[in-house]
Image (cartoon, rainbow, N blue to C red):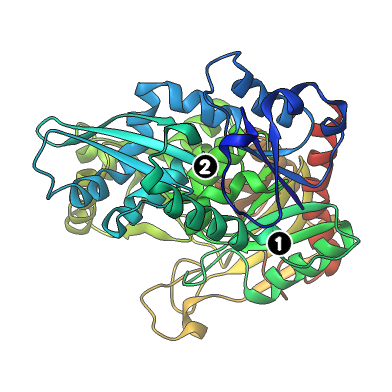
Amino acid sequence: MRKIVVINNPKDWQLNIEGVEVVAVRSYLTNPQYADIKNVRIFNLARNYWYQSAGYYVSLLAEARGQKVIPSVTTIQDLKSSTIVRVITDEIDELIQKSLSKIKSNQFALSIYFGKNLSPQYDTLSKALYNLFQAPILRAQFQFQKKWVLQGISPISVKEIPESHKPFLEESANEYFKKKRYDGKRSSKTIYDLAILVNPNEKAPPSDKKAIQKFIDIGEELGFYADLITKEDYSRVSEYDALFIRETTAVNHHTYRFARRAFADGIPVIDDPISIMRCTNKVFLAETLGKAKISTPRTVIVHKDNRNDLEAMLGFPIVLKQPDSAFSVGVMKAVDRKSLDEILDKMLSDSDLVIAQEFLPTDYDWRIGILDNKPLYACKYYMAKDHWQIYNWTKSKTDDQYGNAETMPVEKVPEIVLETSLKAANLIGSGLYGVDIKQKGNSVYIIEVNDNPSLDHGIEDYCLKDELYRKVLGSLLRRIEQKKTL
């Protein structure tokens, strides 16, 4: 991949960086030879990124040309808004306070060169800020107001960098350009770069290692160069043509920030941030399904004023769910008043609202996978041994934690199960979902709609085999191609 640094005056770039082309801003904007370059990364080091300035148009035209650019227009807009800066940096507030705790003055300026600072003690903070605001050279201004507050963060030109900092700038730039994944070998068949977000330490990831390898291998057949990334790679999201999240998602979590970054940069992503927000909050699902008159177990949105009415409304046992529960974590069963009060005391201390549902015992739950508003796969997940859920996290042995699974062709699923699952998933969006349904006789009840559903080797792919992976990756491929035609 070609790497082009775009700068106002190429003479200001007095750095010896192998494999990097240096181009003047005006040349990039006006010379037709740069309009049709493919497989290129643009590093915009213009003097400023003011709206409708030449630096702004470098990033804007790069995106219009289908070229990967740092910073993106979204980042440029974020940098200009003090409100957005403060909101985005809230998540690293603890790191800010810890990193600046020994500073005696009320103001502090932090220079960030390709994600690093001249002083190693500020490296962690510099990397965190670069991950949030992806521009090659930045200066962050902090002020102490009872605690340290980031007042603003802005790009700086190479001319503004002190001469004494230039050797470190060159060292940081060399390290930055060399470590990037696009320097690695890739098949001549691959066209697009795909990031697969994973957590190697996750106890129950949505895809096992064999499934992940299938996505990599079949992705190459389809023209993807797949790269596994982790939460430390937030700064690299804009390098890719698509993002596929294979880590359990949550809104107050880095998975949401990855999805939001990709979505804001116009990069096709599964799961998209809207789906994550809607699916991971059980309060939203309860309200949405209720308004659509889709059958669910009798459901009550619980708060401190109605908690004492649950026994009369639902009877015992009662299933209680934290709003952001996933994979049965944060889902508990109250069998009497004492256990109900104990569970609610804990849950309502963490959230103002909690979900309560009547208990519908069944031997299994249906899971219908939905992709692009069409059924993808169908599974029966049986309850874990001697347990009322398909997951039993209290057991230490893996074999006792999960119930058995039975996968069948979609056409063999009862019509009412398919219709109801599609109706529920369509309320969320047009991404990848797993709809959980309980069936009692001819009646079906939606338990929840999951973004980020399990896609494990030997289970969800049992009927479709490799075709399941092709369908999922094919959806991302179509989204990329559709984006190119806009």
431 and 444: which is toward the camera? 431
Task: Write down the residue under mark 2.
Answer: 136
Q: Quadrant of residue 12?
A: top right
Q: Nearer the viewer, residue 150 or 54?
A: 54
Q: Which residue is mark 1?
A: 183
- The reply to whether residue 414 is in sight is no
Provide the secondary structure element on which disc 2 rests: loop
Q: Which mark is residue 342?
A: none
Would residue 115 appear left or right of 481 to someone viewing this image?
left
What kind of element bears circle 1? helix
Residue 435 visible in image? yes
- Residue 307 in percent (x, y) is at 23, 39
View extreme (top): residue? 52
Disc 1 or 2, which lies upstream in sequence?
2
C-alpha span from label 1 to label 2: 18 Å
**Where is residue 146 drawn, in percent x and y?**
9, 33
Placement of 98 over or under 189, stated as above or below:
above
Q: Identity of the amino acid at label 1?
A: Asp
What residue appears at the point 80 percent right and 65 percent down from the top-left corner? 186
- Specify whether 215 is left or right of 125: right
Q: Which percent across, then down, holds residue 421? A: 68, 44
Which amino acid lies under the numbered mark 2 shown in the image of this protein? Pro
- Where does the C terminus fall, quadrant-wise? top right
Vertical order, 410 against 464 (above or below) = above
Q: Considering depth in this image, is 425 or 382 the residue closer to the camera?
A: 425
Q: Estimate how packed mark 2 is, as few (under 14), some (14 to 19) or many (20 or more) residues with alpha carbons within 10 Å.
A: many
At a point 23% along the width and 54% down the height, the residue shown is 343
Q: Position of residue 365 (x, y in %)?
A: 59, 60
